[in-house]
Image (cartoon, rainbow, N blue to C red):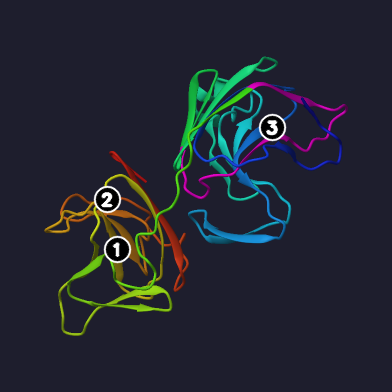
Amino acid sequence: MGTTVEGSPNSFLCTEREYGDFVLEFEVKVDPVLNSGVQIRSHRHDAERVVRFSDGKQVRNWKIPAGRFHGYQVEIANNKDGSSGGIYDEARRGWLKDPAKDPVASKAFKDNEWNLYRVEAVGDRLRTWVNGVPVVEVIDSWDLSGYIGLQVHSFKGEKPAQVRWRNIRIQDLGRHTWKRVWDGSTMTGWTPRGGGSWKIEEGALHGASVAGDTRVGYLVSDESFKDLTLRWKTKITKGNSGLFIRSEPKTLAAYEVEIDAQKRMGGFWETGGRNWVTGPEDNAGAAANDWNDLTAHLHGHRIV
C-alpha cells in the first residue's frame, strides 16, 4: 500500500532488477481522488540527461533531471478520467496513447474496486488490458528493458490518499536486443548497385550522386530480413533519398522510408506499387541539416 505525503513529488517502489520482455499482471485499488501508475522498462540516472525527440510538430530537447525515474507508465486513474491502462512516457514525451476517448476501454476501470491489469511487453510492442478489456497497443522502441516501479503520485488534499496493489506476478520472457547491420567501418555485408558513389567518412556512410550519371544508386545488404524493427540516424542537406525494406531482390521494389530535405521525412512509399502509403505532409518533426533518428517497424502486415 502506498500513501501520499503532502509536498512529496512522485515516488516509486522499484524492482531490484531490470526486465525486458514480459507479461505482468496485478490487481490495484486506488482512492478515486488519486492518480497512480506502474512504470515498466524505466530508468533513473545519477546525472542530468538531455533527450531529443519529435512531437510531430517540432524537434524538442528535453532535460531529465538527475535521479528522476522516467519511462513507460501504465496509467491508473478513476473511471471518470478514463485513462486507465493508457501508456504515458513519464518525465519524457508525455502521452503515447490515452484511451480516454475510447467508449469501451475508458470505462473498464471500476472505482473503489480491485481492478485486474495485464501488461505485455514484447520487443517494441506494448499492450494493456484492464479487467479483461483490451485498452491500448503502442509500438515504440525507445526502451527495450528497464525497471518496474509502483507509483504514488504527488497529491494535495484534505487527507492522505492511498493506492493498494496485490497479486503482482510476472512471466519473464527474456529480452530483445539490437543487432548491428553495418559494422561502422567497412562495406562488409553490403553491395553497391546502380549509380552514385559510396564512401565511409567519420564513422558514417556517405552516398552521393555522380555528375552525368542518371542511374539511381543503392547500397544493398547481403543479408535478407523479414520481420524487423530498424533504427538508424540519417542526415540529408538537399535532394531526396530513402531506406528500402523488404526489397525484391532483382528490381528492388520495396517499402521505402522517405528521406527528404524538404518534406515527408519518415513517410512510407511503396516503390513499384501504391506510391505513398502513409507519412507526414511536411518536415516539421525533422531537424533540418542535422542528424535525425528514424525507426521503422515491420512485423507481418503491420508497418509503423
Q: What residue did someone put label 3 on?
A: 36
Image location of residue 273, percent across then percent down: 17, 51
Magenta highlight on residue 195: no
Image location of residue 299, percent across then percent down: 32, 41
Q: What residue did someone put label 1 on?
A: 242
| Residue 79 to residue 238: above or below | above
Of residues 213 and 238, the one drawn nearer to the viewer in this rendering = 213
Give the residue type that dot 1 points to. Answer: Gly
Is 71 left or right of 66, judged from the image as shown? left
Residue 89 in view here: no
Marks 1 and 2: which is nearer the front? 2
CB under 8 Å between discs 3 and 1: no
Residue at the bottom extreme, as displayed: 211
Q: What residue did someone put label 2 on?
A: 225
Marks 2 and 3: which is nearer the front? 2
**Regarding mark 2 in the picture, which secondary structure is present there?**
loop
The residue shown at (26%, 66%) is 190
Q: Which residues are magenta?
A: 138-167
